[in-house]
Image: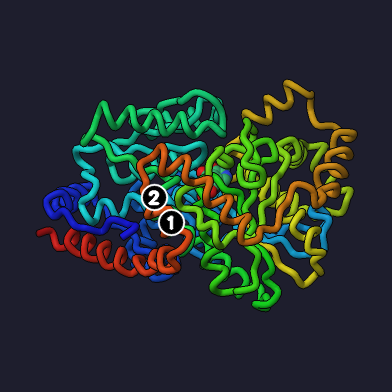
Amino acid sequence: MLINLEVNDKIRQKNIKRCREKGILLPTFKEMLNPSTVSDDIKDKLSKTGLWDVDPVNLYRITWHNEPKAKDGKFGDVNFIEVPREISGVKARIIALAGKWFPCGVHKVGATYACLAPALVTGNFDSVDQQAVWPSTGNYCRGGAYNSALLGCSSIAILPEEMSQERFNWLKTVAGEVIATPGCESNVKEIFDKCHELDAERGSHIVIFNQFEQFENYLWHYECTGQAMIDVCHKLGIKDEDVKAYVSATGSGGTLAAGDHLKKEYPGIKVVAAEALQCPTLLRNGFGGHRIEGIGDKHVPWIHNVRNTDMVVAIDDEDCMDVYRMFNEPEGKKYLAEKGVSQSDIDNLESYGISGVGNVLGAMKVAKYYEMDEDAVILTVLTDSSEMYTSRLKELEDQMGVCDRDDSIRIYYKALMGQNIANMAELNYYDRLRIHNLKYYTWVEQQGKTYEEINRQWYDKTYWEELPKTTAKIDELIEAFNTEIKSGK
Ligand SMILES: Cc1ncc(COP(=O)(O)O)c(C=O)c1O
């Protein structure tokens, strides 16, 4: 089984006792997918709780359906925005889920919950005596540290030293330990090395939830991100045949897994993996540092189902930083208004973090590549929001001054309207196999995966099919765990 659901009852009982003492209940996948089914008692508590509060009831806000409010929110439709054509410059509709309305402001909080919950309810993680380790280049350690705090267990966040200052500042308030590893965004090997070091030092005192290999990360996005996109398409009355592409930048490859779900619903859809042009690992087996925090880590994640990836698109990090700058500076917004962007769309600009901008630029390139018409719909994700990167804005301002009208004109025509079809590749069978084969060097040579399993990933059709079948089993385990918490035995 790709997800370990073997039960260790002794530890499981310890976890139940602790959750009972702390008044913690755990949401199921069913509830994350459809939170209207959550009990009235919990909804009532949520209506008095801030979105970012470190309160265990916020576990029930791990859903795309939160009312977009910082406090006292209830549940509603999936949060998304449609990128206006005055910004995209393409005919196709670009529709992006908005991660801003998750607790702690990032969609990866969902994937970390999906890692932690099965481990708690099976007793594969001891919430009393073990520390949860969250290695990440982006928001995964933020979500992991936050969820650990909600569950009252100790955590270690590991991230590269060059990540934005607000990430470190906030992490220090929730994580037990914060470890900075050498380098930037694309230095994942250094993170893996730190994990091995911790493992050797602390052994059974820690459990490492490595997002790059943890299939629970895949599963959460397959189920929740995938279904949220389908819900949006239904709400907007989009015809199935018009859903043409899904674009997701890949860090751990978790978010991309929504594409596997979408492919079942819309078999003609193109699943597009985006990465930074400065670190074009999928496109060119390339490497390098870049500034799109959270993605592009110089390897192919173990949980990336490469057989289902139809296209790779590389985005220039300079364009992402420029657009991020324009979206957040008064002159930039003023210029966009002149170009016809409505006030409500300008208000929405705060929903775009840097990788979110990258995803939208990727979607624009895909629309141009396939010469899509106005009925075509491209789905993508704004994984977090601009508030995660205010220090970057300050750095850009220190380097280049405030974004003025001339900058805005340049950015608008170069980074938005000027996106073209360079640095993209439609993948054939052997292109996909080349990318899949790259996994060997990271995972089999360095990280202890087997030759048999890497081949199963490619040749055994049942390998990936097995994963969604575990969702119901995880829900059963969560329900039984909650029942025992409530029964007070
Ligand atoms: C800001 C940001 N964007 C994109 C991603 C990529 O998501 P995934 O790891 O699911 O591929 C991450 C991952 O943490 C992230 O933090």
Mark on residue 172? none
**Real-space Cα distance between discs 2 and 1?**
6 Å
Q: Quadrant of residue 296?
A: top right
Q: Quadrant of residue 2?
A: bottom left
Instruction: Decide if residue 149 is in sight here.
Output: no
> Badge 1: how crowded within 10 Å, few (<14), some, or many (20+)?
few
229 with respect to 60 (left or right) = right
Q: Residue at x 79, y 54 (%)?
A: 88
244 with respect to 485 (left or right) = right
Question: Label 2: which residue?
Answer: 451
> Badge 2: how crowded within 10 Å, few (<14), some, or many (20+)?
few
231 with respect to 488 (left or right) = right
Q: Answer with the quadrant where ligand 1 appears in the image.
A: top right
Mark on residue 455? 1
Do tag 2 and tag 1 residues touch (Cβ < 8 Å)?
yes
115 with respect to 279 (left or right) = left
Q: Looking at the picture, which amino acid does disc 2 mark? A: Tyr
Residue 330 or residue 227, whichever sits in front: 227
Quarter of the image containing the N terminus? bottom left
Q: Looking at the picture, which amino acid does disc 1 mark? A: Asn
Image: 142 above or below 224: above
Residue 372 percent across, percent down from the top left:
79, 66
Q: How many numbered dots are placed on residues in this image? A: 2
Q: Residue at x 45, y 49 (%)?
A: 302
Instruction: Decide if residue 232 is in sight here.
Output: yes
Q: Quadrant of residue 466?
A: bottom left
